[in-house]
Amino acid sequence: MSSGEFDALWPLMVPSVRRGRLDAVAVSAKGVRIRFADGREVLCGSSGLWNCSLGYGNEAIAKTVGDALRHASYLSVWGMEHELAHAAATALVDVTERPEFGRVLFSTSGGAANDMAMKLARQYQTLSGRSERKVILALHGGFHGLTYGAFALSTGQLGQRMYGVDRRSVAQIVANSASDIDRVFGKIGERVAAIFVEPVIGSGAVVLEDDYLRRLFDVRRQHGVILIADEVTTGFGRVGPSVFASSSWEEPPDVIVAAKGMTNGTQAASALIVSTLVSERFIEAGAVLGHAETQAGTPPSCAAILATIAEMRRLDALRRGAALAAQLDRRLSALVGHSPFVSPP
Ligand SMILES: Cc1ncc(COP(=O)(O)O)c(C=O)c1O
């Protein structure tokens, strides 16, 4: 490829200008470094899109995925089952370390999984005799993806109105504000199906406070709404010290949405880890959830999930990540007052 050459690739979420500049085209990635077509090798400070937590080019994950592809290049979880999908589902339930979780649904991205979670919540309410409960609440400032359902939950000026995103059955609440919960539930409490939260809101790194979580748990009990933890970014040790950030909550959510770190960035894979309370409602009713994706839960994606979990354990990634975070905190704190880009926590 030569500099300035017209490129068929239309990169996402950046202006659609002509591209192909050699300094912007990555050619390989290994460990914590990415090499570009102009020969530069740069440190990746974000682990890809926060999804390659164990580094690029993990050999064990590559081998396991390659073996799975040779063993069964494609099998589905749409209307059928396969062995690796059972194993990956069990492993995902296990890493929650919560006895309340029992079932896993596979999807292919964070956005698609959130769409599926919205359907799950509304159908759960219908199966519970509360079909008027359709509204999904999400936290102001949160991001849940750009598929149409998830887009409706995401804040930020991302063109929702232009694209005709339907927001009639969603509403936003202010994070860490018990009075805002009271305001919204005072108005539309009997129509709420579920509350979506990021345990740490990505934009601004806002951590949900314990008192606020307690209020959410109370509301769940009072109204029978389901609580969905979008752990697409916070999951898989991203905020430690557990695999999921919600593991430190006093009560579990009803659904965990997992994606990014789950395959160390090697597969288009995501999952809903669902509490037995919710899944049993479907099983008792013999109900079918109206969601499936051809590429969800394939052998390579399930193999990647299993290998990523095994590698996290072998590398002691949670403990080492926490130690590195503490070290970074100390070093960054020393920069406060010396750089306009570093402010106190
Ligand atoms: C919290 C959260 N949820 C959902 C998504 C969407 O995930 P995906 O890009 O896989 O659709 C993101 C992406 O950054 C996210 O941060």
Image: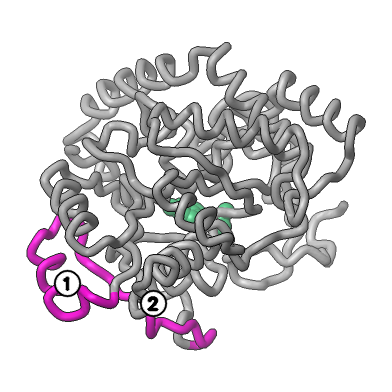
Residue of label 1: 185
- Please report the residue visible at 38 percent of the width from the left and 80 percent of the height from the top: 169
Q: Position of residue 190 (x, y in %)?
A: 23, 75
Q: Is residue 228 left or right of residue 89?
A: left
Question: What's drawn in magenta, residue-wise?
Answer: 162-191
The quarter of the image holding the C terminus is top left
Q: Quadrant of residue 133?
A: bottom left
Would the CB of label 2 be found within 8 Å of ligand 1?
no
**Callout 2: helix, strand or loop?**
loop
- Please report the residue visible at 52 percent of the width from the left and 61 percent of the height from the top: 285
- Please report the residue visible at 19 percent of the width from the left and 47 percent of the height from the top: 213
Callout 1 amino acid: Phe
Callout 2 amino acid: Ser
Residue of label 2: 131
Which residue ends up furthest to the right in the rendered image? 70
**Mark 2 packing: few (<14 Cα in 10 Å), some, or many (20+)?**
some
Q: Position of residue 152 (x, y in %)?
A: 44, 74
